[in-house]
Image (cartoon, grey):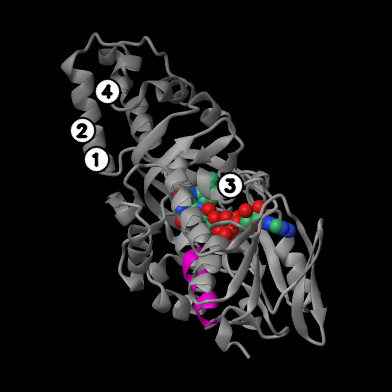
Amino acid sequence: MSEILVVGGGAAGMMAAIIAAENRHSVTLIEKNEKLGKKLFITGKGRCNITNACEKEELFRNVVTNPKFMYSAFNAFSSEDTVSFFEVLGLKTKTERGKRVFPASDRSSDVIKALEKRLKALGVKILLNAVVTDIIIESGSCRGVVTDGGILKADKVIVATGGKSYPLTGSTGDGYRFAKKAGHLVTEPLPGLAPLKIKEDHPKRMQGLSLKNVVVRFFEKNGKKVYEDFGEMLFTHFGVSGPVILSAESILLKKLAKEEMRLTIDFKPALDDKKLDNRLIRELEVSPKREFKSVLKTLLPSSAVPVFIDILRADPDKKACEIPGSLRKETVKLLKNFPLTVTGTGGFDEAVITIGGVDVKQIDPATMGSRLCKDLFFVGEVLDTDALTGGFNLQIAWSSAYVCAKNIGENK
Ligand SMILES: Cc1cc2nc3c(=O)[nH]c(=O)nc-3n(C[C@H](O)[C@H](O)[C@H](O)COP(=O)(O)OP(=O)(O)OC[C@H]3O[C@@H](n4cnc5c(N)ncnc54)[C@H](O)[C@@H]3O)c2cc1C
């Protein structure tokens, strides 16, 4: 039995503490906030998408950075295991569109409560309002941590401090400092799954409008298409957000840091140009006295209509029978290729995850142990591995924490 300190009471930290305690280690969980799981509480818009009930291959496909590193961890603790783990703790779950798994109650607080109950039942010592400021390394081994309340000695230390996104939840990148002290390389942390800033004021004018089935396409300055996706998006006060945009941001992050990109939205992906033109002709012919703005309303959400009219420089009150063919063709073009200029990403305050972190080449994937410093471990988002939306990032946290805590006694 070892004395284990877990730094950070988020998803990964709580899982690591539970599994280590189940394996008869004496565990102390240290959290800087006044309560556990502050970020977990806001996940999935307060509903917490705990995992994705997909096949293992799909799980790997959704991991964007270093999927191979997660091989042992996902094999040791799969998304199926996550569901069983929570069901055993008494948390009923349900699977929604896209195989996203949520608590049946739709409350992230129930996920936190289930974890807290188990921690207490296992006798894990929980220190709240305690900030770890440093790790103690002696003769190449991690021997404990320094907190704002004093020194805590241990046989092993698990760092589960998360990344840098949504810093108000407590994830302020402290773990990177601890890793560097032990000699680890840290890949530059960047905001991932973040909304995009747009040069034009069209998003602001359509703020709050959510589009369900659209195709987004991203182009480099030279006109080369570099990304395409289908799904849901949202207009915000400064740009665009929603699932397809967040995924695009994570994948195009490096390009977006270098240059402005062109984004086009296809409002009518089910219809090609010809079919859409025929549809518009029908709408114009069916009531020739109808105003252009009313015709547009048959094809678009109301809040998008004034924006379309301005871009087309059209008279909103012009009668359908007076609409020239050129305006009709321009309208079709705009519906299929609504153009926006992406100037950058929302930054850490709005990023769902951090891309980058502790370089996985210096971490043993079977134990999450440091290859440079004995008895030091890293789990969860602090590591340089990340995934798309859909419950995959929490699965990284659960699996990496599990494989670490389960095998922690094996680490030499
Ligand atoms: C708005 C939002 C919604 C999300 N929704 C989902 C979702 O539905 N599904 C999904 O899979 N993923 C989601 N994510 C991502 C997911 O929340 C993270 O990937 C996951 O929480 C990472 O877990 P972690 O334990 O590694 O880090 P965190 O959850 O960030 O936990 C780290 C903990 O360490 C503590 N800590 C940090 N430094 C110190 C220190 N020096 N001393 C003591 N304590 C410290 C922090 O206070 C924090 O409690 C979402 C993220 C956000 C921001």
- The answer to which of marks 4 and 1 sits earlier in the sequence is 1
Between circles 2 and 4, the one closer to the viewer is 4
Between circles 1 and 3, the one closer to the viewer is 3
Q: Are marks 2 and 4 in contact (CB under 8 Å)?
A: no
The residue to which callout 2 is attached is 278
The residue to which callout 1 is attached is 274
Q: How many C-alpha atoms fall within 10 Å of the one at disc 2: few (<14), some, or many (≥20)?
A: few
Residues under labels 4 and 3: Cα distance? Answer: 44 Å
Can the viewer see residue 248? no
Picture layout, residue 86 above or below residue 112: below
The residue to which callout 3 is attached is 38
- The answer to which of marks 4 and 3 sits earlier in the sequence is 3
Tag 1: residue type? Lys
> Does label 4 point to a residue whose CB lies under 8 Å from ligand 1?
no
- The answer to which of marks 2 and 4 sits earlier in the sequence is 2
Can the viewer see residue 182? yes
Q: Quadrant of residue 375?
A: bottom right
On the image, the x and y values in percent for residue 240 come to 52, 39
Residues under labels 4 and 1: Cα distance? Answer: 18 Å
User: Which residue occupies 38% across, 58% down?
Assistant: 89
**If the image is split into quadrants, where does the N terminus sit?**
bottom right
Mark sitting on residue 298: 4
Residues under labels 2 and 1: Cα distance? Answer: 6 Å
- The answer to which of marks 1 and 3 sits earlier in the sequence is 3
Tag 3: residue type? Lys
> Does label 3 point to a residue whose CB lies under 8 Å from ligand 1?
yes
